[in-house]
Amino acid sequence: MRERLIAHRGLLLILGLGLFLRLVLIAGLPSTYADEGDSAIYRRLAINLVVHHEYSQDDPLAAVRQPSIIRVPGYPIILASIYAVTGLYNDQVVRGVQAIVDVVTGAVVYSIVTGK
């Protein structure tokens, strides 16, 4: 096991540095969120899943919400899971989870490309 870690120390250094820099950047960013575009749609879908148990892109405060098919449910379910555990609008944690997933994706791609 130790030999494998030594053989891939360059990759581990790059991925570790990338994760560290992203986490530093995340820590320095305010925990704000976008009110428009895709981010807002995904956030509304996730909040409606947590609060109302409905898959809707309508405003969570609306009296009536219509079901939505604008996005597939994978990412909104991940967001809803994070919000259910850490609280609504907790984008710092969402960004952290995304940074970790990105590093793991980089390691998987490296493994596939090199065959190791």
Image: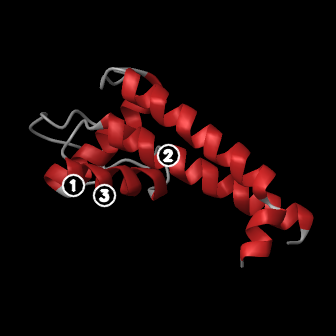
Q: Which mark is residue 35?
A: none
Within 10 Å of the Cα at label 3, are there few (<14), some (14-19), or many (20+) other Cα atoms? some
**Residue 57 visible in image:** no
Disc 1 versus disc 2: nearer the observer = 2
Mark 1 in CB contact with mark 3 (< 8 angstroms) = yes
Residue 6 drawn at (x, y percent): 78, 64
Instruction: Choose between 90 and 1: the one closer to the eye.
Output: 1
Give the residue pinned by disc 3: 81
Q: Position of residue 15 (x, y in %)?
A: 67, 47
Disc with the residue nearer the chain's start (2 vs 3): 3
- Contact between marks 1 and 2 (CB within 8 A): the answer is no
Q: Which residue is mark 1?
A: 84
Res. 94 image quadrant: top left
| Element on which disc 1 rests | helix
Q: Amino acid at mark 1?
A: Ala
Residue occupying image coordinates x 70% and y 53%: 12
Distance from Cα at disc 1 to Cα at disc 3? 5 Å
User: Which residue of the protein is positioned furthest toward the bottom in this rendering?
Assistant: 1
Is 13 on the left-hand or right-hand side of 116? left
| Residue 31 image position (x, y, % from top left) | 30, 26
Q: Which amino acid is tagged 3?
A: Ser
For the residue pair 110 and 41, the one nearer the viewer reads as 110
**Percent x, y of residue 113:** 89, 61
Q: Earlier in the sequence, mark 1 or mark 2?
A: 1
Q: Is residue 41 above or below residue 82?
A: above
Q: Is residue 68 visible?
A: yes
Residue 96 image-quadrant placement? top left
Mark 2 vs mark 3, CA separation in Å: 13 Å
For badge 2, the amino acid type reads Gln
Tell me: 97 left or right of 4. left
Q: Disc number at residue 98?
A: 2
